[in-house]
């Protein structure tokens, strides 16, 4: 049986929120089978649990935000991406503020935290959502067009294309495909950082956003070049970060997908629209488990390797 996974022990981190600039403490704790991933706001007068599911997403401006009532957690996508990449099914995320810490702007720090806690197999079958027919969402026309799509595939792969008219981005790869069955998430995707432009950062700060952002947790560009002294971590780091984000956004479904995802200029909002479009068509998907691990797609049977 292909089994569910949680952590062997708890692990902690302290950082600041990218947009709020607030100090935040994060504790990742093991959870029972079929719990899923649950964020818990422990700073509120009575702690509030916010389970990960597609309809818990209530805001997708600049990041993915989940809510229950008035309790929110912003910027969940990098931690969710790490959980997707390592195959973590069940986890409690205790958090002392309303935004997940940005740490280094990628998911690498979360991968390190999860792997340092150890990954435990649980006596319950891993449940997948298998896409049975294509689902697509699309916006705009011509030069403003953007879209995201899921196709049937025995495994999990993602293809993303960006289209930024900027010298620093134009000189890098703007399209990448990552297959969980043949690639290594920790090595190939996890280190890609979020990115932004100085002109946008100035505007966001004027609106009370990006207060915790800087060169130590983002790629920052002026009108011509990358300002970070150490340059890029990957030749195609920009588009790889979009793959990282998409893996996190799609894992908000609550179960791993068996599908091929492809997108052009998509973002948090469109990724969530894609999940909701999938769930709205029950005939387009089914829940499956694998009693025989050998029949599971490549990339899912073994816990993810370290770096």
Image (cartoon, rainbow, N blue to C red):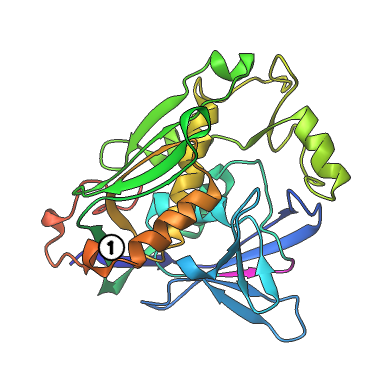
Residue for point 48% across, 42% down: 244
Give the residue drawn at x 54%, y 43%: 108
**In the image, is residue 186 part of the stretch drawn in magenta?**
no
Residue 97 lies in what quarter of the image? bottom right
**Main structural element of the magenta stretch: helix, strand or loop?**
strand
Numbered range of the magenta stretch: 93-97
Q: On screen, 112 above or below 176?
A: below
Disc 1, SS: strand
Q: Is residue 123 above or below residue 115?
A: below
Closer to us: 32 or 269: 269
Where in the figure is residue 306, as x and y percent of width and height? 41, 43
User: Looking at this rendering, what residue extends furthest in the right direction?
Assistant: 206
The reply to whether residue 82 is visible in this rendering is no
Please indicate whether residue 295 sits to the left or right of residue 125 in the image: left
Residue 183 appears in which quarter of the rendering?
top left
Q: Is residue 60 left or right of residue 54?
A: right
Counting every numbered tag in the picture gives: 1
């Amino acid at each position: 049986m292909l089994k569910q996974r949680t952590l062997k022990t708890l692990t902690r981190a302290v950082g600041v929120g990218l947009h709020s600039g607030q100090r935040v403490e994060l504790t990742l704790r093991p959870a029972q089978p079929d719990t899923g991933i649950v964020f818990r706001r422990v700073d509120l007068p009575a702690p509030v649990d916010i389970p990960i599911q597609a309809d818990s997403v209530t805001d997708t401006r600049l990041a993915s935000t989940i809510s229950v009532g008035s309790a929110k957690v912003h910027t969940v996508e990098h931690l969710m991406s790490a959980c997707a990449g390592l195959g973590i099914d069940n986890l409690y995320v205790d958090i002392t503020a309303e935004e997940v810490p940005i740490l280094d702007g990628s998911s690498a720090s979360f991968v390190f935290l999860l792997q340092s806690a150890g990954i435990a197999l649980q006596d319950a079958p891993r449940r997948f959502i298998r896409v049975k027919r294509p689902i697509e969402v699309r916006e705009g026309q011509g030069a403003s067009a953007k879209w995201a799509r899921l196709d049937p595939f025995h495994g999990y792969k993602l293809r993303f294309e960006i289209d930024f008219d900027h010298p620093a981005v134009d000189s890098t790869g703007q399209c990448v495909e990552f297959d969980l069955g043949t690639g290594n998430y920790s090595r190939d995707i996890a280190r890609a950082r979020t990115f932004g432009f100085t002109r946008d950062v100035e505007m966001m700060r004027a609106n009370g956003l990006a207060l915790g952002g800087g060169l130590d947790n983002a790629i920052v560009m002026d009108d011509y070049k990358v300002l970070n002294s150490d340059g890029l971590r990957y030749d195609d780091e920009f588009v790889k970060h979009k793959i990282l984000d998409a893996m996190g956004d799609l894992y908000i479904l609550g179960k791993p997908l068996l599908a091929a995802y492809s997108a052009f200029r998509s973002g948090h909002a469109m990724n969530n629209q894609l999940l909701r479009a999938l769930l709205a068509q029950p005939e387009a998907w089914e829940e499956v488990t694998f009693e025989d691990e050998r029949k599971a797609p490549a990339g899912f049977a073994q816990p993810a390797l370290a770096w």
